[in-house]
Amino acid sequence: MIPFLHLGPLTIPTFGLMVATALLISAYVLQADIDRRRLHLAGTKIAAGGKQDEGFLVIGIAGIAGLAGARLYHVLESPSEFFSNPWPQLFSRFGFAWFGGFLGGFVALIFLARYYRVPILEFFDICSPAACAGYAVGRIGCFLSGDGDYGRPTSLPWGMSFPNGVVPTTERVHPTPLYELVAWLVIAWILWKLGSKALGTQRPAGEIFCWYLILTGVARFLVEIIRINPRSFYGMSNAQTASVVSVILGLGLLWRVGSRRNPAG
């Protein structure tokens, strides 16, 4: 593994490098979605061929909020350790919780949707494929740094060891960041295709976001089965508990937006 790149006097963490790359790719995906919808994030449509660059600003703000949420959620999972020595833990380059990042980015997107005067569910629909693509690329950083996000020991031929990782192991383990990379890219593609089908049709706002909640929740729950995270709530890890909540919310919201489209009678 390659936790750090050494370029002369510079030492660059590969995790941070991939997070920056993930934000950039998310911005390109989001901007592509905005452009194909001919949407200007001030509540008006833009003319054919017109270009805007709001996607990069949205991802920049939501990305920073997501990183802050991911870091804060991670340190608060062990409150006694955090309050005994808070500052080094807050500003460590490692240790970010997926669900905290989701919450931080989610809150930021709500404020951005209100600022740009775009309906919240429509705004979430536009951002969902970009969020999946960014998460997938960010997991490459976890893989390169060997930060402990790998899974349980395995004898499968693609099992890998991380002897030089930030959290080293010489056992062959499941490379779960690679599993998530593939899963989230597939989900991003599915959501993008759903968005393509919605163009020019009267699909209910929020439908794509619902599938984002459902599919990512299922994917993360399954990956956690072979992860080494501690179990707490009914034998589930914190991420699995959050995944169950995500799936339930997604199904409930999908039923709600579907009922609006097909009212009884």
Image (spheres, grey):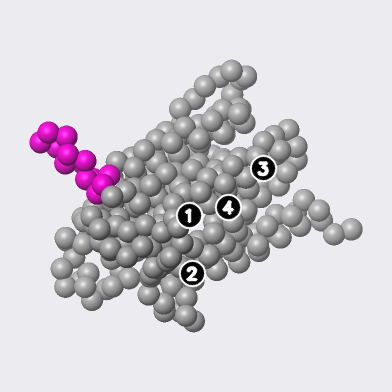
| Amino acid type indicated by mark 3 | Leu
Residue appearing at x 43%, y 36% in the figure: 25
Residue 219: percent from left, percent from top: 54, 59
Q: Nearer the viewer, mark 4 or mark 1?
A: 1
Query: Which quadrant does the C terminus fall into?
Result: bottom right
User: Residue 225 has which mark?
Assistant: 2
Label 4 to label 1, Cα distance in Å? 17 Å
- Residue 251 vs residue 34: left or right? right
Judging by the rendered image, the residue that carries numbered circle 1 is 179
Q: Mark 4 vs mark 3: which is more N-terminal?
A: 3
Q: Mark 3 vs mark 2: which is more N-terminal?
A: 3
Residue appearing at x 38%, y 63% in the figure: 173
Nearer to me, 171 or 246: 171
Q: Nearer the viewer, mark 3 or mark 2?
A: 2
User: Residue 194 has which mark?
Assistant: 3
Label 1 to label 2, Cα distance in Å? 12 Å
Q: Is residue 132 magenta?
A: no
Mark 4 is surrounded, within 10 Å at the Cα level, by few (under 14), some (14 to 19) or many (20 or more) other residues, namely many
| Amino acid type indicated by mark 4 | Tyr
Residue 66: percent from left, percent from top: 38, 51
Q: Secondary structure at mark 1?
A: helix
- Residue 78 vs residue 220: left or right? left
Q: Mark 1 vs mark 3: which is more N-terminal?
A: 1
Judging by the rendered image, the residue that carries numbered circle 4 is 212
Q: Secondary structure at mark 2?
A: loop
Magenta stretch in the rendered image: 2-14
Q: Is residue 186 above or below residue 160?
A: above
Label 1 to label 3, Cα distance in Å? 23 Å
Mark 1 is surrounded, within 10 Å at the Cα level, by few (under 14), some (14 to 19) or many (20 or more) other residues, namely some
